[in-house]
Structure formats: C-alpha cells, structure tokens
Amino acid sequence: NAGVTQTPKFQVLKTGQSMTLQCAQDMNHNSMYWYRQDPGMGLRLIYYSASEGTTDKGEVPNGYNVSRLNKREFSLRLESAAPSQTSVYFCASSEQGKYGYTFGSGTRLTVV
Amino acid sequence: AQRVTQPEKLLSVFKGAPVELKCNYSYSGSPELFWYVQYSRQRLQLLLRHISRESIKGFTADLNKGETSFHLKKPFAQEEDSAMYYCALNGGDKIIFGKGTRLHILP
C-alpha cells in the first residue's frame, strides 16, 4: 500500500550544488507529475510525463530537468541549485488525471 | 483559458458554524473537478470528485455550470477540519490547481 514514494524527505543544499529528487509509484499509473508548493502560490507544475518515454514542461520548468526512467519512476534534477528553488516538492501520479492524483509525502528543500 | 480561482486565501470559522470554500473555474468543455485537502505538513489527499457525488468527512460540493462554480460546503465545522484546501480541474493531460484556501476553525 505504498502509493507514491518520494526521497529524500528533507534536503539542504548550497547554492550551485546539484541533486536529484526521486519518485516512484506502484499503482501502474501512466502519468506522473512534479509540483512545487510555495506559500501564497499554491501548487505549480514543473514537469509532467503523460506516459512512459514522454516528458513535457509545466508552468515553471526553468532550472529543472526530469527523467522518466520507466513506468514506475520519475526523477527531478536540479543541476545548479538557487535559493529561489527553496520549496516543498511533490510528486504525483494518476491514470490520465481522470480520477485525480495520488501524491507523495513531499521533499522539503532548502537552498542556502 | 483553463483556470481555477479560489478567492479566499484564509477563511476563519467558529466550530459548529457552516463552512463554504469558494471555487470558480474556467474551462471550455465539460469540466471534471476535485477538492484536495492538506493537513499540516502532510501530503495532499483527494477529498472528493464531483463525478462521484460523494460526501467525505461531512463535506459536499455541487458543480454549478451556470455559475462555473464548485464550492465546498460543510454544515457544521469541526476543529479537525483546519487545513489547506485546493480546488482542482482536470485539464486533460494535467490537473490545474487553485492557489488554495487555508481554513482555520476557531474554538
């Protein structure tokens, strides 16, 4: 009954460092998403993958890259972290969005 | 344009009083709408979908196509309802979220 699993839960980076946020789902969903959540801004879509082998930019893709490694896994990479990327990152998956998303527990990232 | 608007950032309601969280949408086709809830420092959870016409934790929401609204209602607020609530719209290949309303239940 894992659903969507994100790692790590917390991370502190220095400006300019890189890291990859991992996400995996065990519900056989085709679609996966990365959002960031900031106070007063709600949830903003970074990248999404409608199906294995495809990725598309969302609302705020700059500074990020993604990889849909297989149907289960969808990773988000920050190549050179900036303080503006301090946020809570959520991964989600769905079956074409029709029945809503299942969210992971989030990664709280601080860039100093 | 596809858009979800939640006009209230914060809503404070006394325990036992009725709750209404407003949501308006803009969508050219037949909309599919959701409400999500996020309790303090937890993941977002699906609260309800308009297509299933459910009532979860005493909350209901009715789609009003004429007013393009999907307001969330509960007749009697409870302290455990304090949370962040997001209205969302199925935009085809992705779900579009409103900016959220923080519901604060006063004792």
Image: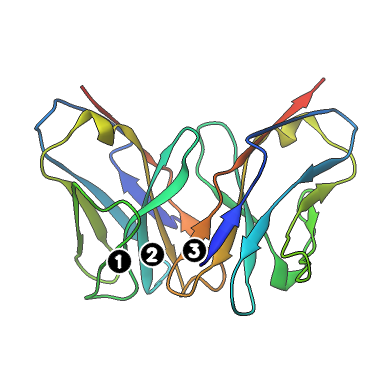
Q: What residue sits right under mark 3 in the picture?
A: B95
Q: Which kind of residue does numbered mark 1 sit on?
A: Arg
Neighbours of disc 3 within 10 Å: few (<14), some (14-19), many (20+):
many
Label pair 1/2, CB-CB below 8 angstroms: yes
Q: CA distance from mark 2 to mark 3?
A: 20 Å
Q: Nearer the viewer, residue B45 or B66?
A: B66
Q: Coloured how? A: rainbow
Provide the secondary structure element on which disc 2 rests: loop
Left or right of residue B83: residue A66: left
Label pair 2/3, CB-CB below 8 angstroms: no
Q: Residue at x 57, y 50 (%)?
A: B45
Q: Residue B46, percent across and down?
A: 60, 55
Q: Residue at x 26, y 36 (%)?
A: A85
Left or right of residue A63: residue A58: right
Q: What residue sits right under mark 1 in the picture?
A: A72
Q: Residue A67, percent across and down?
A: 19, 62
Which numbered mark, 1 or 3, is in the foreground of this view? 3
Q: CA distance from mark 1 to mark 2?
A: 6 Å
Provide the secondary structure element on which disc 3 rests: strand
Chain of the residue on which disc 2 is drawn? A
Q: Is residue A39 above or below residue B95?
A: above
Q: Which kind of residue does numbered mark 2 sit on?
A: Asp
Mark toward the start of the polypeptide (1 vs 2): 2
Q: Which kind of residue does numbered mark 3 sit on?
A: Ile
Residues indicated by labels 2 and 3 sit on the same polypeptide chain: no
Q: What residue sits right under mark 2 in the picture?
A: A26
Chain of the residue on which disc 1 is drawn? A
Chain of the residue on which disc 3 is drawn? B
